[in-house]
Image (tube, rainbow, N blue to C red):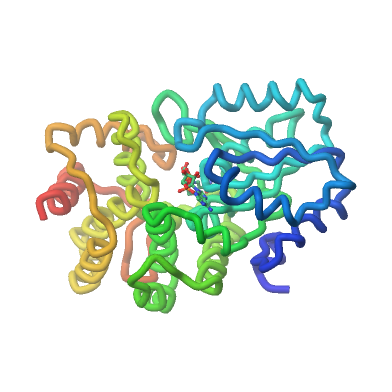
Amino acid sequence: MNFLQKNNIHLISDLRTISKSIVDADYSQVYVLMDENTNQHCLPLLQDALVDDEVYFFFLEVPSGEASKDLSTCASLWESLSEDNADRKTLVLNLGGGMITDLGGFVASLYKRGISFYNIPTSLLAMVDAAIGGKCGIDFVGFKNQIGVFQNAEQTFLYPPFLETLPELEFWSGMAEMYKHALISDTAHWTALKIFDKAEVTPQLIEQSAALKAEVVANDPLEKGARKKLNFGHTIGHAVESYFLQKEKPMPHGYAIAFGMICEAHISAQQNRLSLVEYDEIEDYLKTKYEFPTIPEKDFPILFEFMQQDKKNEHGSVNFTLLNSIGSAVINQTATEDQIKASLTYLLDE
Ligand SMILES: NC(=O)c1ccc[n+]([C@@H]2O[C@H](COP(=O)([O-])OP(=O)(O)OC[C@H]3O[C@@H](n4cnc5c(N)ncnc54)[C@H](O)[C@@H]3O)[C@@H](O)[C@H]2O)c1
């Protein structure tokens, strides 16, 4: 049994593995939560593999997009579960990207003080990141993941063939989190990822990236210390994501994180942690993969405001994870407003 399997995370090549797990655990009923895209593209594959003569399945669909990760969607899902008298032996199957795994995990964790859920991530981002590590939450009053819990999925199944229908933009969004895992902890993984020009990656690299996340999480499940490494790129990335959400021009999560990683690598270099050679390598590479929208300098204060609200902050100062080198991160760092501004100006002016 490998490290992922010990943590109930399984790379599978046959969806019947999921069906077997459900039947063995003897759930009273099973709700499949999805959005219209995963309903159309992923449910047919899953349904072919589900044994439905022993288990009663219900299907719940919410509109795709970050806007569904909100309290009103939770309320309507809790209403559906209540109307159907879903009991505590009910299972929720989260079939979708990170929006669905975050939302479904949160809804399941609070319904009747918690029912089980399986994550069946269908986007690359969810396979290597969102579906792993037990953070479930929703956005609130304009802030990302403002309300949430730590609750692990009972089981998580990674089935890479789902990626065949994933739009290319979403593929690159997921690659950003893979690059992050490499930059914070594994130089060899960074080198291995850099050989892919096109929107493709092997199941083995997906498994490795998922394992890099799972290992960090296993050492610090509640993010008291080492898990903060995973926040590299996220202080500025989340602010940028929230900014474009507010402007009603949502930016894919991974694109915002790629933006944040370049800025936070720039801050690492300004603080003489990261060498300029390695900074250039990161910046040059990420810029070949991602195009970023512009943000006028007059709007920087809005970004600072979002950074001030970040959940990672303690004692009023904005918290950063920075890089010492490719493959090595340092947590609990601060940056001056000038350093942050310089990184944003540098990226946006280039
Ligand atoms: N909990 C965590 O630790 C964690 C970590 C990272 C990100 N997240 C969250 O994850 C979310 C982003 O995840 P995401 O990028 O997967 O977004 P998403 O769930 O919105 O999916 C992106 C798009 O791809 C579509 N899609 C997904 N799988 C598909 C498939 N196989 N075929 C066709 N279309 C498919 C979706 O319908 C959606 O339109 C954000 O809400 C972010 O905050 C959470």
Farthest-out residue, left? 349
**Residue 247, percent across and down?**
28, 29
Residue 341 relative to residue 68: left or right: left
Residue 271 relative to residue 211: left or right: left
| Residue plotted at (32% across, 39% down) | 239
Query: Is residue 75 at all visible to an observer of this figure?
Result: yes
Q: Nearer the viewer, residue 43 or 88?
A: 43
Query: Is residue 226 at all visible to an observer of this figure?
Result: no
Q: Nearer the viewer, residue 330 or 143?
A: 143
**Residue 346, percent across and down?**
13, 53
Q: Locate the C terminus and report the quarter of the image it occupies.
A: bottom left
**Residue 19, percent across and down?**
79, 55
Q: Is residue 1 above or below residue 349?
A: below
| Residue plotted at (26% across, 57% down) | 262
Q: Is residue 240 above or below residue 178?
A: above
Residue 168 relative to residue 266: left or right: right
Q: Is residue 83 above or below residue 159?
A: above
Q: Locate the N terminus and report the quarter of the image it occupies.
A: bottom right
Q: Quadrant of residue 71?
A: top right
